[in-house]
Image (cartoon, rainbow, N blue to C red):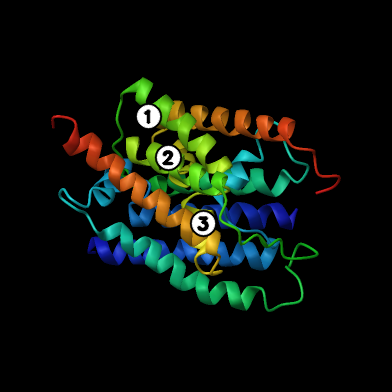
Amino acid sequence: MMKHVSAFLIGLLFSLGLVISGMINPAKVLGFLDILGAWDASLAFVMAGAVAVNFMGHRLATRRPHPLFAGNFALPTRNDIDLPLVGGATLFGIGWGLVGFCPGPAIASLGAAPEQSIAFVVAMLVGMSITRLVQAGGLRRPSAS
Amino acid sequence: MHDFVLATIGGALIGLAATLLMAAHGKVMGVSGIVSRLTPPIESEWGWRLSFVLGVVAAPVAFTAATQSSIPFTVTNNMPLLIAAGLIVGAGTVIGSGCTSGHGVCGLPRLSPRSFVATAIFMGVAMVTVFVVRHGLGG
């Protein structure tokens, strides 16, 4: 139970950051991405603030023997730059630039302007699911995860 | 308060959330990873993921109620464009193993080479896309 309350509150905190910073607003995001137009630089401070805090926080958090509610830290271990990474990031960049929604703010906007964001979110979930189903069918399933 | 101050405070809260998710659950706070694993084929550890997502949706509702003000929000009403962008973002973040939060907020502080490359690419491509849409197509 505490595990779920904790995850809920962390999601709440993350989303509050999106609201306060203005990152939840696609128009503001497009203004930030429009570097050769009327550039709104403010969102650079969102990433800078988040990276600075988590740079220190991540090191403090992972210094402990294990997480509060789990047996171990699930940290990505891969360091190779492969085609899916490059191609996937390129696709994501195109979609992000088209309307100004990346996944976090898109989900958060369901709590701010659901009627304006639901179509994007449903399409995003469909895109995610189809891609994962294709990956699961094309690759041998890991024996345990 | 100035936009830059609000952006920095908001960013700090986002970074703190990422730290807390690692400290409490041992997980990378990548929203595309968390959300995509709640879609078929659903993974077994879905409880904390659903709780996190509910928190993300609840925050703007709580903020609006507490401050008695609406959150600035404007997005295109071009339905085909919204759907196409949603499909592309969904597929791209799964194929590329992450989005702004997973690669940017979590991967950069971990000094992950994959996240540095991915973040540079999706930020750069998004900027080019906005340029083409706003200034490149007879605009």
Residue bearing mark 1: A116
Q: Do callouts 1 and 2 point to residues on the same chain?
A: yes
Are circles 3 and 2 on residues that touch, CB within 8 Å?
A: no
Residue, far right = A143
Q: What amino acid is found at the position of numbered circle 3 in the picture?
A: His
Q: Identify which residue, B32 or A9, lies in the foreground.
A: B32
* The label number, if any, that marks residue A109 in the structure image: 2
Point out the frontmost of discs 3 and 1: 3
Q: Chain of mark 3?
A: B
Tell me if residue A111 comes above or below residue B104 in the rendering. above
Q: What amino acid is found at the position of numbered circle 2 in the picture?
A: Ser
Marks 3 and 2 sit apart, C-alpha to C-alpha, by 21 Å
Report helix, strand or loop for mark 1: helix
Report helix, strand or loop for mark 2: helix
Q: Position of residue A91 (x, y in %)?
A: 45, 39
Marks 3 and 1 sit apart, C-alpha to C-alpha, by 27 Å
User: Around disc 3, counting alpha carbons within 10 Å, would you say few (fewer than 14), some (14 to 19), or many (20 or more)?
Assistant: many
Q: Chain of mark 1?
A: A
User: Around disc 1, counting alpha carbons within 10 Å, would you say few (fewer than 14), some (14 to 19), or many (20 or more)?
Assistant: some
Are circles 1 and 2 on residues that touch, CB within 8 Å?
A: yes
